[in-house]
Amino acid sequence: MFITRISCQLLLLFLLMLTLLVAAGSPLLAATLEVDDCIKCHSLEPQQIAKDGAAHQFAINCLDCHARHRPVNANNIPSCADCHAGSPHYELISCSGCHNPHKPLKVTLTGELTTECLTCHDQQGTEMTANPSMHADVSCNFCHADTHGYTPDCTSCHQPHSATMAETDCAVCHAAHEPTVLAYPDTTADMLCASCHTAALNELRSSPSKHRDISCATCHSDNHPAVASCTDCHGKPHASGIHDRFPLCMDCHNTAHDLDNLR
C-alpha cells in the first residue's frame, strides 16, 4: 500500500512538471529534431526506405513528412494527398490499404479490389467492359493475388483445350482481359486449332487437294471464327454458266477441308 501511494505521488509530480514545462515553453520540448535523430528509435523504417523507398528515399527525408514529434505535434502522420495529386489513383481514400509509405512500390493487395486497380489500369477495364466474360465477375486480385505485378497461369483455373497445350499457348489466341475475343497471328500452329477442331484438321490432312498444305490460319485469319471466301484466292475459276447455276462453291465441292470430294 505504501509503495503504491509513493508511485502515485511520483506520477502526479511528473505530470505536474510536464504541464509546467509545456506552459513555460521549455526548450527541452522545443528542441529541434534532426534527421539523424529518427533512427535512434525508429530502426525499421529507415531500413525499408533504404531498400524499397523509391522516390521517398531521395526526394524527401523523414522530417519532410513527419513535422516535429509528438506530443508537440499530435498529428505528425501526413496524408499522402499532401504531396500526391493529379490522377484518379491519388483520389482513393485509404492509401495504406495497399501502400506502405516507407516502401511505396511494394504494393500488397488485400480484400477484393477492382475499382482501386482500374484507377491506374484503365485499359484493362475498358477491354473487360467491351467484351464481357466470366473474368469480369471476379475482382482483379482474384487472379493477381496478393502482390502487385503477379500474373497467374491460365491453367491454374482453366483446363487446356488438349493434353498437348502448354501455358504459353493460351496467350496465342486469348487475352486475359477479353478472353472471348480470339485473335491470333498467321503463324499459329495447326495443332492449336486442332485442340478444338480435331475433325476438321483430320479431314483436311486426309484430303488430296492442295488445301492440305495450307495452315488453318491462312484461311481463318486474324480472328476466330473468320472464314475466307473461296473467291479470295480462287476468283471464279469455272465458266460463268456454272457459277450462275451453282453460286455456292460448296454446292459441288463438299467442304474446303475435303475439296475434291465432289457432290
Image (cartoon, rainbow, N blue to C red):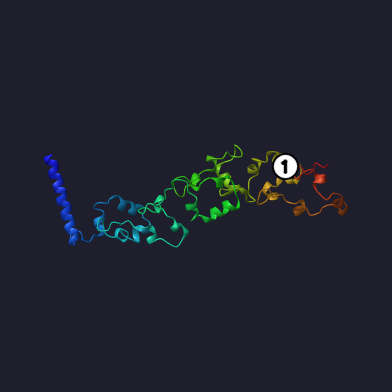
Q: Residue furthest right?
A: 241
Tell me where residue 189 sits by quadrant: top right
In terms of image quadrants, where is residue 212? top right
Amino acid type, residue under disc 1 in the picture: Leu
**Viewed as shown, does residue 227 lie left or right of 110?**
right
Q: Nearer the viewer, residue 94 or 186?
A: 94
Taking 218 as reference, is 65 above or below it? below
Q: Residue drawn 31% across and 61% down?
A: 64
Place of residue 112 in the rendered image (x, y in percent of width and height, measured from the top left)? 47, 46
**Lateral position of residue 103 relative to residue 258, left or right:** left
- Tell me the residue at 24%/60% (across/down): 34
Would you say 114 lies left or right of 65 here? right
Left or right, residue 143 beside residue 74: right
Which quadrant of the rendered structure holds the C terminus? top right
Q: Of all residues shown, which one is farthest toward the top?
A: 163
Residue at the disc numbered 1:
204
Count up the numbered dots. Answer: 1
Secondary structure of the residue carrying tag 1 is helix
